[in-house]
Structures are given as structure tokens and as C-alpha cells.
Amino acid sequence: MAQLNSPLDILKILPKTNCRDCGEATCMVFAVAVKQGKKKLNQCPHLGDDLLSQFQVEADSVNQGEEDFLRKLNQQRAKIKEIDDLLGRAEPMGAEIKNGKLAVKVLGKEFLLDKDANMASQCHMNLWVQRPILDYAVFCQGVEPTGKWVSMRDLGKDGAEWANFFSKRCEEPLKKLADDYTDLFEFMVEIFNAKRAQEFDADIAVELRPLPKVPMLICYWREDGEMGSQLNLFFDEVTPKNLPVDCIFTLCTGMMIMFEKIAQTHGK
Ligand code: SF4
């Protein structure tokens, strides 16, 4: 019996029709749920017994996702320690050097990173912030954003693979938040240095800088008659050269969770 080790392995044997008969929005979301142990493979009604008997999935334990996250975080810390000239990374990253440390702006707030991969900030130090900063320090090629905005789906092969999952986990919850909390975009402008972007065909458009060379555009269209509201995130076309796509997903998910907490505490 063949073992399916990842969501992509699982996706390969699914019909990929996104019919939703399993209760999930897409086959990709179903595949992730199976890997996480939240769904069983046979809950896709379109897989015959013959096929099901050929494969098995080793589902993640409940804390597997968290364990994986921490393991990757530690791997990135080890890579930071191996960089001979960490301060030399300041220029490509668009960071500064302060007291012998890299000073990186995340949503306008400063985070300090030293050569032993220690991080400090006056802000609350969420894990979701730490991993993108470490990835950015290791990976960023220093490519200047061009100002051409594209969707996740258009961020190369990796972007296309992550697009449906990204939409489900980031854009949909953020749209719901924008529907429910009318002050959400004011928070972004006031607290996180977001800039209003007038030139886009959206009711509200704001540009954020989660990392110096990783800009992000949020466009929101209010409900209009029979048309429901809509929210889309856009990235500069060069973003994958400065941050891997899976880390863009981590960054956006973390931001969405943070906005959710802030809106619940202060929103209307
Ligand atoms: S029921 Fe099967 S084919 Fe349909 S969306 Fe779910 S996984 Fe995909």
C-alpha cells in the first residue's frame, strides 16, 4: 500500500474537480485537512474502493503542525548563526544596523536580530513574526519591488499551488473581518503604517509593508445589491525573490490572526 506523505501527494489522487461534495471549498483544502487528520480520505465520495485500497495517509498528530513550525523556526535560527556577515544582509533586506544588530521594520514596527538569532522588539513577539523575519534574513535577494501587483496565483508555480489554500485561510477570513468590523482599515492605517491607495478600482485599498521589500495590497469591495463583498490580497511580482511563497502564506495568516484579535478588542 503506497503512503501519501504530504497534501500534494494526496491532491494527486483526488479528482481535482473542486466539487465541494466533501464539504471543503477545494480538493487542495480537503487534502490539507486529510493530512492534518481532520478528514478521512474516504470522505471524498468520488474515490472508488479500488483506489482507496491502494493508498494510506499518515495523518499529522494534533500538534504536528505546531511541531513542524517550531522545527522550521529552529532550522532558520541555525542558518542565521551560520551567516558570517549578518550585518552585510542589511542593505539587500532594506534593514538598518543598530547597536550591532539588524533592525528590520515589520508593519512599521522595529525588530532587532543579532548574529545568535536572538530577536527583540518593543512589540509582542509572536512566532508568526519571527519566522518570516528569519526567512527574510536568510533568503531575501534584495530585489526592489516594481510596483506591479499580482495575485498569489500569479506568483509562479508555488503561488499557483498555494492559491486556493491561501484564499480559504487568509482572504476569506479577512473579508469576513472587513465585513464585520468597519474600522479594520482605519486600524491598518493608524497602527500599522498602511497607506491608502486611491488608484485601484476598489471601495477600499490599502498598502502594507509586512517586510521592507515585501509590500502587500489589500483591496476590498463592499456588498452591492446582489453582489457580495469581496477581498483580495495582491503582492509585488518580485515578492518570491525576497520571501518564499510558503512563508508569504505564514506571514499573511499571522497578520490575519493579529487583525482579528485587534478588531475583536477594539472594533465596531
Ligand atoms: S469531494 Fe472530492 S473531488 Fe470534490 S472537492 Fe472534495 S476532494 Fe475534491
Image: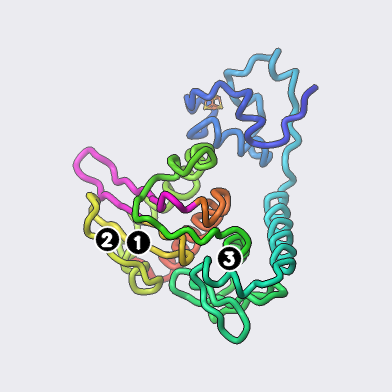
Horizontal side of 149 relative to 132 (left or right) equals: left
Say what amino acid the circle numbered 2 marks. Ala
Q: Residues within 10 Å of mark 3 (few under 14, many from 20)?
A: many
Q: Is mark 1 within 8 Å of ligand 1?
A: no
Total marks drawn? Answer: 3
Say what amino acid the circle numbered 1 marks. Glu
Q: Nearer the viewer, residue 243 or 247?
A: 243
The quarter of the picture showing ligand 1: top right
Tell me, yes or no, whether the highlighted magenta stretch contains residue 55: no
Say which residue appears at 62% left-offset and 18% top-offset.
Answer: 47
65, above or below 130, in the image: above
Please, what secondary structure does the residue beneath circle 3 have? helix
The stretch of residues the image draws in magenta is 218-239
> Picture coordinates of residue 202 (x, y %)?
24, 51
- The tag earlier along the polypeptide, 2 or 1, is 2
- The tag earlier along the polypeptide, 1 or 3, is 3
- The tag earlier along the polypeptide, 2 or 3, is 3
- Mark 3 — residue? 133
Say which residue appears at 55% left-offset and 72% top-offset.
Answer: 90
> Picture coordinates of residue 135 (x, y %)?
61, 60
- As drawn, the label of residue 207 is 1
Tell me, yes or no, whether the highlighted magenta stretch contains residue 236: yes
